[in-house]
Image: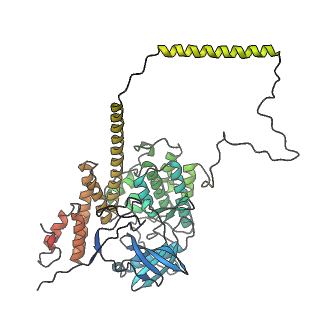
Amino acid sequence: MRVRSRRTVVSAPPQCPRCGSPRTALDARFCQICGGRLLPPDMPTDPLLGKTVLGRYTLQSLLGEGGMGRVYLAEQRLGEGSRRVAVKVLAAARGNDDYIVTRFRREASTIAALTHPNTIRIHDYGEEGGRFISVMEYVPGGSLAELLAREVVTPERAECIAWQVAGALQEAHDAGIVHRDLKPENILLTHVGGVETAKVVDFGIARRPPAPGEKPLTVLGTMLGTPAFMAPEQFRGEPADARADVYALALVFYQLLSGGRLPWAASSTMEWADMHLHRAPKPLSEQPGVGELPPRYEPALSRALAKDPKDRTASTLAFLRDLTGQEGPPEGPRAQSPRQRVPTVVGGPSAPALPSERPPAVPLKGSRAGFLAVVLLSVALGYGLVRLYQRWASRAPAPTPVSLDAALDASRDASQDASLEVARHRARRTLQRGMTAVDALDLAGAVAALAELQARPTLPAAEVEPLRRALEAQGSAEVQRLLAAECSKAQEQACLLRSVRADSAARRRFTRRCPAPTCPARPLRR
């Protein structure tokens, strides 16, 4: 008797796990309110949802998932009240990897050593049932990457965000900690007291001074980070210091003002390495859609993106000073412009009196008859000017009448052209996000980006085809790796690839590796 394995599946929650907004459609992949990624309609049952970990944190919903584990929204009871926290749980499969476990523990201790208001705070850490758990503050809102996908950021707002991120990084650098993975996805945005606030997160691969008796985790010559934001010395496998974070912060600021674009375009890790190591960045002013910018931006970005760390800006705060021309972030309301400033006089017996701006009034001289003559002359002159204007207006040609239908058609055509251009701009951002996800081995994110492009075909197929090919190649390699361990997981990955028609290579892997008729991957054959 043949027994076919089954997976228990549940329907995805009808609301967004990040902001709680209702799901607009069953096949929707992104939230229409916050832009967060939605869970698939049918997904394996998560055994942790609804449970209480570490005795006081009840997991309510899934906020995100990465290669190391999952992040949940949880509720912590505090007396008669409660507060929301973010609980990061290391994946069970990673719990047997000493390197990953050590990285997870060090991330908790690294964040605990930082107190800057723009750095994510950690509340608790522990181990339960073989799972390693860290509890951090919950930051409502989305990431900087989601903001870039929705709207264009003004220079003033970009400077404000950059000052906050630079302050958080500067505190870490003063403590000998280098983030090494700064990117828009690792910067969260929220509102505190009505003020937009940035939070730097994910110190998973941060470098810090080793404690006494502690062995370093990064081997010399190892590359760590996201290829699109890695400094040249990181590609060379050299030790990274604060200047690597300056390089990444400059790229983030470049993206803020360019509508999400980077100074280069690449589709693989090797191409990114060539761009960062040998190619000069494209000037920010040459990016399409970028308006007039302060002249200090280009030289400040050029120094921060220098290939040699010795030629690069030494610190994040120094980069912001070069960028803004200010010694520190603006505090409170902006200072008034010189035209609006009112001179303030400090009272006192020795304070000299300011001269009056208006000359003293001169008494009118002459008789009353002379005054009336001046008034009558002014009235007569005004009447003459009015009559002259009326005669000139009567001789001017009448304006050509314009059809109302023609005006409406012209307005409608202009509106459609503008909407199409905006849709193409957003589609190119999605395409870039998908290529970045492929390089970061985030196949689920790449599949979601490709599915979004296929659902809304605003770009030519030739522009989208490189993403599909890159995803197919990376997905085939991932399926081959999973086949060596467990065919069912490989089947899940191949089904995900099939949803965006990127499974032909994966199908060949199944045909060669799983000829047995009882293999759960057999239904994938065509």
Q: Position of residue 252 (x, y in %)?
A: 45, 55
Q: Is residue 349 left or right of residue 506?
A: right
63, above or below 353, in the image:
below
| Residue located at (48% from left, 80% from top) | 125
519, above or below 223, in the image:
below
Q: Position of residue 363 (x, y in %)?
A: 83, 23
Quadrant in which the C terminus appears:
bottom left
Q: On the image, which quarter does residue 320 sit in? A: bottom right
324, above or below 397, in the image:
below
| Residue located at (46% from left, 64% from top) | 240
Q: Is residue 330 left or right of residue 480?
A: right
Marker count (numbered): 0
| Residue located at (33% from left, 31% from top) | 406
Q: Position of residue 136 (x, y in %)?
A: 49, 73
Q: Position of residue 436 (x, y in %)?
A: 35, 59
The residue closer to the viewer here, 455 or 395, is 395
Query: Residue placed farthest to the right in the image?
Result: 349
Q: On the image, which quarter does residue 143 sit in? A: bottom left
Whether residue 255 is visible here, answered yes or no, is yes
The residue closer to the viewer here, 288 or 320, is 288
Q: Is residue 254 left or right of residue 375?
A: left
Quadrant in which the N terminus appears:
bottom left
Whether residue 216 is visible here, answered yes or no, is no
Colour basis: rainbow
The residue closer to the viewer here, 210 or 375, is 375
